[in-house]
Amino acid sequence: MRIFDPHVHMTSRTTDDYEAMYAAGVRAVVEPSFWLGQPRTSPESFFDYFDSLLGWEPFRAAQYGIAHHCTIALNPKEANDPRCVPVLDALPRYLVKDGVVAVGEIGYDSMTPAEDTALAAQLQLAADHDLPALVHTPHRDKLAGLLRTLDVVRESALPAERVLLDHLNETTARAAKDAGCWLGFSVYPDTKMDEDRMVAILKEYGPEKVLVDSAADWGRSDPLKTRKVGDAMLAAGFDEDDVDRVLWRNPVAFYGTGGRLDLDVEKPGATHEGNSVLRGGS
Ligand SMILES: [Zn+2]
């Protein structure tokens, strides 16, 4: 089973996770930029993080045979902090970089006017840079949040077929599908969405334009959830082609539209900007 996790925050994960993911079949990941738990106080803090997503983390992933790309954005939560909003002005210089395959994650957290502004501005940036967009849908007031997101997408220059709406569930999948967007489902250990519910959704909607991710981060989460969904699909009667479509071909198709996806994992060099992962190395 070959697996592409289209949404996982590897910066928060250990090398044990990389090893276990590779053993489970994961060969490619996309790491969306997001908030770090601890609030950031200046744009410079974002820039160091973006540089890490473009340099250090792909270097680390390659040690384990996994291709790593990222999405870059001002995340919805920190879009509410005036100290962070100037990040928007600096995004164009990141959105031209080879490792960036989409704008994201953008969208709504608490559905504030500041989030409206950041979402609309970043959909425009995606259109300007010929990139797709990864859109986080809120965990509270899910359907209202999704409908408001769809309104902003419709008013934007970015076509719906270049938008991946993530964190969907049974209440939001229909509207997302009817709008023509790609459908993302984050599968968590004990809340929000599990593998059996995911299989039921796939039975109802089919595998077309459906992506499954672990959204693993610094909270309770499981980077092997993609594999567990694949196994649950097979146990429920889906064939290997369906599994391959959901866990590999769909994310390749979605993130490939920007023309920057490179799934050949290069043999990692010994160091990244002079730093080695070897203890005692330079
Ligand atoms: Zn995320």
Image (spheres, grey):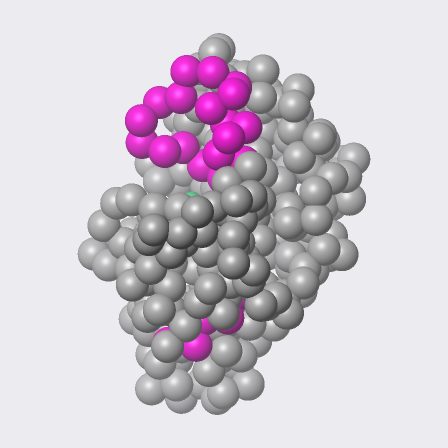
Q: Residue at x 35, y 69 (%)?
A: 19
Position above or below: 211 against 57: below
Query: Front-most of 172 and 269?
Result: 269
Across and down, in percent, residue 69 comes to 58, 53
36 lies left or right of 275? left
Residue 254: in magenta span: no
Position above or below: 243 against 28: below
Q: Residue furthest top?
A: 82
Query: Front-most of 104 and 147?
Result: 104
Residue 48: in magenta span: yes
Question: Does residue 14 show up?
Answer: yes
Ligand 1 resides in the quarter of the picture at top left
178 lies left or right of 80? right
Across and down, in percent, residue 224 comes to 33, 67
Stretch of the chain drawn in magenta: 24-50
Across and down, in percent, residue 193 comes to 31, 57
Which of the 4 image quadrants contains residue 248? bottom right
